[in-house]
Amino acid sequence: MNSIQTGIRTLASIGIFAALMANALAGSAAAQNILATIPIPSASAGQIAVNPALNRIYSGGGPTTGSSLTVIDSKAFSVVTTIPSSAGVSVDMREDNFWDGTLSAGNINIYAGATDAQVFSIAVGSCPAAVTFDCARGRMWVASQCGTGNDPVWVFNTGTFAMIGSPITPGGTILTPPVVSPDSGKLYVTSGGVSREIDSKTFAVTNTTYGTVMAIDSITSHLFAVSGTNLQIISAHNDTISKTVALTYTPAAIGVNNAMAHAYLLNSAGGSIDVYTEVGKKLATFTLPAGNQPNSIAVDSARGRLFVDVYNTSTKSWSVLVIEDLSSVRKCSYAGSCDY
């Protein structure tokens, strides 16, 4: 081999090595890591909740008769059990109980998180569906979804299971799960297409000046609302909009990691999840496997994991994706970074 051939061989080797290194670095710089895909019944796709202390994911059915609740082990990534007749779910992190509405069955059921056994049932009628927990006050809010034009909302003491006050009628049909503020105890609910809030003491209903509230950071009291294709970031302390971000889609749902101060916007049509800071700066886009449309989300802030109900357009089936958020690991001075 002459010197020219040797030089060419050396340059080629360097080029191959550089390409391999570039690919390796590109792979290592991924903002997400999909840890598992867990198949669930289509009847269990709807509201989703997580109990990090018990390593449990709860995927409750949506507003359809005969829905179910699938309990998943978030450590083994396997289905533990499926409970019939569920239209929503939320976890009481004080007691480790999980609550669900049964829609047309007219009951609100409470289950022990340690055993998945039912411990109580409350008959309310009027299609109880989505459930929302107020940890600060030990309350569980339940919204109806009968679609009759005047869906009621109930509030319960999670320690005694007793209803507090009477059913509240904000007026109109409720199509999205309500959100409660631990700061003020207000419930934010969109009914009849109008964004409203319910006072925690008087239960008076008033209209808000922003869109549908989809999530809240319980630490910073930042609300995340959607108005058309705009994301609105709102202070729950004074109900003022601090930032409006123009999007190209209407998010199907929003999740929040209150340890990393990340908001996750589900782009169903785009098959992706956008990650934003709580001041409205876009950090990353998680691209889901082909054909997967995200529908609802729960977040384990302690482990930096997202649990997302997705519909696969190719297989016509539902599953829960377990996604690890790595979007700010390499960003200096960001929540969730490792620049120590």
Image (cartoon, rainbow, N blue to C red):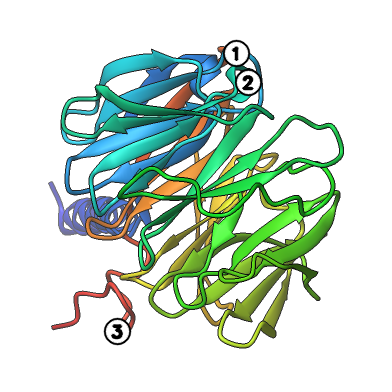
Q: Horizontal and vertical percent for residue 277?
A: 49, 75
Q: CA distance from mark 1 to mark 3?
A: 41 Å
Give residue 189's quadrant in the image.
bottom right
Q: Residue at x 63, y 76 (%)?
A: 233
Residue 335 relative to residue 146: left or right: left
Kind of residue at badge 2: Thr
For the residues labelled 3 and 2, the Cα–Cα distance comes to: 38 Å
User: Is the residue marked by circle 3 packed among few (<14), some (14-19), or many (20+) residues within 10 Å?
Assistant: few
**In terms of sequence position, does the residue under pointer 1 or pointer 3 come before the other?**
1
Which residue matches tag 3? 332
**Crowd tier of the residue under label 2, counting other residues whose Cα lies within 10 Å: few below 14, some 14–19, many 20 or above:** few
Q: Nearer the viewer, residue 94 or 254?
A: 94
Sequence-wise first label, 3 or 2: 2
| Residue at 71% across, 67% down | 204
Name the mark nearer the viewer: 1 or 3. Answer: 1
Residue shown at 13%/83% (left/top)?
Answer: 340
Q: Is residue 129 above or below residue 162?
A: above
Percent position (x, y) of residue 243?
67, 83
- Horizontal and vertical percent position of residue 46: 55, 31
Is 69 displayed left or right of 268 in the figure? left
Instruction: Determine which of the numbered discs, if any, sits on residue 313 in the image.
Output: 2
Disc 3 residue type (three-letter):
Cys
Residue wearing tag 1:
316
Residues at marks 1 and 2, CA–CA distance in whole angstroms:
5 Å
Q: Are marks 1 and 2 in contact (CB under 8 Å)?
A: yes
Amino acid type, label 1: Lys
Circle 1 crowding by C-alpha within 10 Å: few under 14, some 14–19, many from 20: few
Provide the secondary structure element on which disc 2 rests: loop
Rendered location of residue 133, percent (x, y): 43, 53
